[in-house]
Amino acid sequence: MNGLVAILMRDLRLASRRPTEALMPVVFFVVAASLFPFGVGPEPAMLKQIAPGIVWVCALLSSMLSLGGMYAGDYSDGSLEQMLISGTSALEVAVAKCTAHWLMSGLPLLLVSPVLGLLFGMETDAIGVLMLGLLLGTPVLSLLGGVGSALTLGLRNTAILILLIVLPLCIPVLIFGAGAVSAYEVGLAPTGHFYLLGALLLLSALGAPLATASALRISV
Amino acid sequence: MNKLPRFYTFAAPSRFYRLAGWTVPWFYAVAVVFALAGLYMGFFVAPVDATQGNAYRIIFIHVPAAWMSMVLYMAMAGWAAVGWAFNARMASMLARALAPTGAAFTFLALWTGAFWGKPTWGAWWVWDARLTSELILLFLYLGFMALVEAIDDTRRADQAGALLAIVGAVNVPIIYFSVRWWNTLHQGASISMTAAPSMASTMLTSMLLMTVACWSYAFAVVFVRARAIVLERERTTEWVQTLLGSSLEGAS
Amino acid sequence: MNWNSAGEFFAMGGYGLYVWGSYGVMALWMVVEPLLAQRRFSAARLVALELETSGEWQ
């Protein structure tokens, strides 16, 4: 556990020294989502309808963008290798890194999402449903992203590779996250969606760190 | 105990190479025969469909292509897993040989699906459960192929590919069911193991004949590609050099 | 037999574009793919052969 906490605190500390870099996922999130009205038109009813989908897709993409840096920095200067041979298990490294990634990208996205919700004219309670979905879903993105990130260590074009590898796996999260809000807005209960998101979270929490640890052992 | 060594014998690239070499022509032959039979039945015996007219005949290649895309993905993931677990590089080579053919069948399933959808549903593409899942399956194939190509170290590439393929295989049912929940436009399953098929028996027979044809074709192409990969990777080994050396001297 | 003439066969009751568009691409691919695979095999064989004749591997 010590190793896990140490790596987590280290990553957070490093990120705090580069606040602009750390905030980039959030900035991308807002900018990308804001592009849509320019593309599809400013009509309020339509924007309100497509808002959950847009917020979720942009959350997905901005999470993916920051994945490249999860292990790359430590890999290139050799500290990842040191972590792995130091006695900290690859599993601990995987969990620490995924947690750090979520804290630095998923959580900020979650906190900024109400702003986007308002921009798109969503009702406050619908925004609540959106945020709960993001709370359950963004950790899954970080967990699955960890697998992709660990598999592509040290390769060229990692950003595109990670996107190609991880995005298909994240589609169920997208479906249920955005679906929850759409269902709520139509008058149906979103509980089913939340249960499914919860199930996906449990599954990935159990499986993804193991897969990431495996991938780290393969790649390093 | 005597049976066990015989099962693992084709884990040796040299023995697989020879086995594949003589079986390939037979696989092609079987594919052609079954395709001719299936096409004959499909076009000249099976009747016109009441609702879809002659457009439904696309089913005789669409369904086999879709089935092959899924079977080949499972085979690819399976062999990649075997290669990783048992450190058997022939299994990993076979997984790499399966990928392009699987991806191609997925694309063909999508293409024929679109051409079938246009006259029947009115649009070239509809986001129905099965087509959408096929699209995601194509992305999974492309991801696998991109990853193994991007890694230069063959052992690392094989293992990384295996991990990705396994993660993908685990996700396929999840993706399928979530997409199916998300939208259901496609006709319900026409063929199931227990229930009687809801299509005329001639249509069913044609479809099954075409499936066998596609399967045999896939074996043939995958084996040719696997042989190529064996030569690419094992060219410095003695058996390859001897084999090629003797082919230089002999009539080959 | 379903078809009274070759013309009828190719028209497919008006759905000719879709049926032949599908079968055509499938048939085309099933000619191209084996050729590509065979080409990869021949190329691999050539490289291995060159290695053999040059005697480098020894």
Image (tube, rainbow, N blue to C red):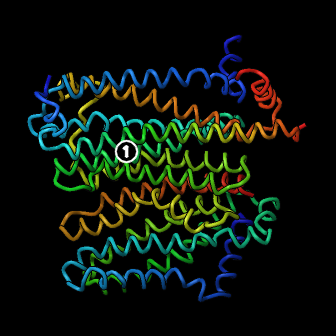
Q: Which quadrant is the N terminus of chain A positioned in?
A: bottom right
Identified at 65% across, 87% down, the residue is A18
Of all chains, the one bearing label 1 is B
- Tell me if residue B44 comes above or below residue B231 in the rendering: above
- Farthest right residue in view: C58
Q: Residue B88: which quarter of the image?
A: top right
In the figure, is residue A50 to the left or right of B240? left
Residue ID for mark 1: B108
Res A52 visible: yes
**Residue B171 rendering spot, x and y as whole percentages:** 46, 49
The residue carrying pointer 1 sits among few (fewer than 14), some (14 to 19) or many (20 or more) residues within 10 Å by Cα, namely: many
- Farthest top residue in view: B2
Q: Secondary structure at mark 1?
A: helix
**Residue B175 rendering spot, x and y as whole percentages:** 40, 51
In the figure, is residue A118 to the left or right of A6? left
Q: Residue A39: which quarter of the image?
A: bottom left
In this figure, what is the number of numbered marks?
1
Q: Which quadrant is the C terminus of chain A positioned in?
A: bottom right
Q: Residue B236: which quarter of the image?
A: top right
Identified at 20% across, 22% down, the residue is B201
- Tell me if residue A157 comes above or below residue C1 in the rendering: below
In the figure, is residue A209 to the left or right of B178? right
**Residue B205 rendering spot, x and y as whole percentages:** 27, 22
**Residue A158 rendering spot, x and y as whole percentages:** 61, 66
Identified at 31% across, 85% down, the residue is A38
- Could you say which is closer to the camera, residue B166 or residue B99? B99
- Could you say which is closer to the camera, residue B8 or residue C12? C12
> Mark 1: which amino acid?
Leu
- Tell me if residue B167 comes above or below residue A122 in the rendering: above
Res A210 visible: no
